[in-house]
Image: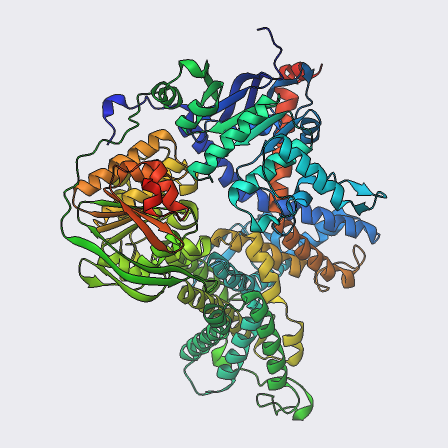
Amino acid sequence: MAETPVLELRGITKRFPGVVANDRVSLDLMPGEVHALLGENGAGKSTLMNVLYGLYHPDEGEILVKGEKLSLGSPKDAIEHGIGMVHQHFMLIPVMTVAENVVLASEPTRGRVLLDYGEAARRVRELSERFGLAVDPSAKIESIGVGQQQRVEILKALYRGADILVLDEPTAVLTPQEAEELFEVIRSLTGQGKSVIFITHKLHEVLEVADRISVLRRGKLVETIARAGATEETLARAMVGREVLLRVDKKPAAPGEPLLVVEDLHVVDLRGLEVVRGVSFDVRAGEIVGIAGVDGNGQAELIDALTGLLRSTSGHVTVGGTDITHATAKRVLDVGMGHIPQDRQHRGLVLQFSLAENLALHDYDKKPDSNFGWLHPRVLIARARALLRDFDVRGGGPMTRASALSGGNQQKVILAREIERNPRVLVAAQPTRGLDVGAIEFVHRRLIEERDEGRAILLVSLELDEVVSLSDRILVMYEGRFVGEFGPDVTEQQLGVAMIGGTVKEAAA
Amino acid sequence: MIDPADKEPPVDEAPSAIDRLALSQRAGGVVTPIITALIAFMVGGLVVLASGSNPFSTYKAIFNGTGLDWFFRFGHHHIDLPFTHQRVAFWWDTGSLAASNLQQTLLLTTPLILCGLAVAFAFRCGMFNIGGEGQYIVGSIMAVWIGSSFLKMNGPLHVILAIVVAAVAGGLYAGVAGFLKATVGAHEVISTIMLNWIAIWVGSWLFGLGGPLQSHANGAAVPVSNDIAPGAHLHVFWGDPILQGLHIGLFVALGALIVYWVTLNRTTLGYQVRAVGFNPEAARYGGIGVARNYFRAMMIAGAFAGLAGAIDILGWEFRLAVNDIQISNIGFIAIAVALLGRNTAVGVFFSALLFGALLNGTSTRNLDPTIFRPDLASNLTLIIQGLVVLFVGADVLVLWIWNQRRRLRIRGGAAPAAEAVETP
């Protein structure tokens, strides 16, 4: 190699009790390069980057920045050597301005005591102009969007003199348009000599933005390849270790009678704001209706109102002709609605419960699980054993705590519980959030199978490609209303425009 | 479904990782309380040292005062078999001084188990019941009231009536806090603390000067209740009834431990309690009434504490004085019992025994004044109690120390090679 790498990781090994999170991983990063780190959840990407940033002390290995050895386990040293990290969850103070957040912890001062606001704002403006990161330095963080907040995080790292930027799953919170803008920013950064490590599990992003791609699987580096030689299929195979079906195979839907009917539903959230403002739709037997939209446009509250977890203020909901408008969660379950909740760890599972107990969450008080208030653990365990086998849950048996399973297997447990009750309507909220390619494939295939069994499925997802590939009809939700209905042949661009409030006509133009 | 053909071969490291994690959690479950207690005793030893005594001989004297040394004094003795007139050989001397010390320790352990369960049950439903003391006092008051009324009643019936009324009253009293949490979201810590003060001062008034339950036998000057009927006394099965022997209330407490475990683990009620305690949002999603469970769990918790109050009255106190109410701290020690016992039945038993022994061992009656000043000794119990609460809150710290210790061992023994690589 002609150039010397700006960063070298050599033989990094990090062990946690019982797990080798990184097994002799070696990477290098060239000046001006975008190096993508690809891998499933739990493959060791985040561990590796935390080692780089000094948050973890590796058991073996060394890190060189511009040929100089980095003292391991010290974030201070990492920052001084020009390593900057943008975490998936932003670490910003909402009530402070952009400039104040950027200069935090190394503020320009006047007389060593007073913060020099003018100087801070000037420096931030200078940085943002230089790298094409348009942000208003005097805006409060709480008043700007997620995409802008991410830019502030990048500015923070640049302000501290970062030459090497680590972006941890940066597109997870962005709309397709915002992601496109981020890629522009990344190109502008590398154009000026900065180097970027881009962590993701989304294949098409890698192919769009990376120069080289390193794939991690179970803590080991599988391969490092140039973008030119890579396709989505080869990357997926490297990530998962076997052939993966990236496109969902499905027959055209054969919709039957409407099973879930919603009429003019209004919902007020806990702050007293009307977040669902008159929504009407139906879902028929044997079809998947997808709801697309940017997070926070009323999807979560709509689902809570349908499933009895939040009281609607007006309107009607019926399942198979039975009115469940103001029914309790228990009644909604018993009428034949299954619910795969958006947040599987905080809502879908009791993590400290065993899998057998979790699988009984809806039916623990009915025969044969219990009798006159007396629980039958053996029945729970026997049923759990059968379900875990049917749904191919790996990593534990009926007595394993739910917290010990990986995200994908946790989701399979929830799927098993909801589908086993044979619901007529299945509400799936972000069913693949945070799952890896293999698990996503499983969940998608299973949802299609359930559709073909004649269930009515309502899918709510922030992942556009998921909505597009699974749904037979797509509704776009914006500020509590449906602003468009599309068929399965819609493009992501059309949906993206509708999601930010553009009309269907604009989308067509 | 995934075709069996393309299933990966089972990864041999995955199950062992889970097994090891589970093992370390289980080990941590036993190890941390023991370390917690040891640290508390060590710091307590420093306090003893600072006050000018020898911590080792002090702890030895305290241990001998607890009567737990009884178990280590074997010999050839005899014991009466219950319900017969036979005597059989027995390893231990049931009539020794150590035996009578042990009886006192177990007398104190009994209410600590029950009040510990009161705190633990609420904990399992995600609530911190500081009100064990108030619920205990309400139970005591009810037991005194029932016990000193209905003097003609059949003995066993009288006992059962007093116990049931006390448990129900304790439950209803705690239920107030549960009801407030369930309906308006009032935090149970605040409301149970307030309920403690109400119980203490209402109790003081009831038996105080001119109060409705004050005894008239000694004139109006002595703030004490009437004695309960002799028929309502609990049977003393070990030791001399006149010298405060051990009564059958101990078996009620042991039974309560079993009831606690069975309720939590084998009933739908316990399933709901644990689901709400671990994750109220998931419980709500699963169709479980969260507010209803707060109310119900608090009532059950209060019933345990009320039971404790009744058993102390019927077992050895027989009357209640204003002074008893104001200096009692069983309900507060019970918090340390539940915390140290990690809210499990077995854990509550052993930590109640530990605190019962400490209370008894440091009492002025048992501790030799030449070894440690007896007026300071009971403060030692309070110091250890406080340290336990402090360290249980910091069990993460304790686990960290434990893991450091293990890491040191690994570093020292197995990984000199890694050290060599790291040094430049």
Q: Considering the image in quadrants, where does the N terminus of chain A appear?
A: top right
- The answer to whether residue A157 is seen in the rendering is no
| Residue A203 in which image quadrant | top left
Residue appearing at x 62%, y 37% in the figure: B402
In the current view of this chain or complex, which residue is farthest to the front? A509
User: For residue A345, which quarter of the picture?
Assistant: top left
Observer-nearest residue: B52 or A213? Answer: A213
Instruction: Specify how the rendered protein is coloured.
Output: rainbow
Q: Quadrant of residue A49?
A: top right
Residue B401 visible here: yes
* Residue A144 point in image, percent of width and height: 55, 47
- A400 vs A54, left or right, is left
- In the drawing, does residue A294 fall left or right of residue A254? right
Q: Is residue A428 above or below residue B328?
A: above
Residue A135 vertical placement versus A71 (above, below): below
Residue A307 position within the rendered picture, expressed as x and y whole percent measured from the top left:
31, 57
Q: Nearer the viewer, residue B154 or A6?
A: A6
Extreme residue toward the right, this view = A111
Please identify the quadrant where the C terminus of chain A is shown: top left
Q: Is residue B132 left or right of residue A468?
A: right
Does B359 appear above or below A60?
A: below
Residue drawn at (57%, 83%) of the image: B227
Residue found 83% across the figure and 46% down from its top:
A113
Q: Position of residue B137 (x, y in %)?
A: 57, 74
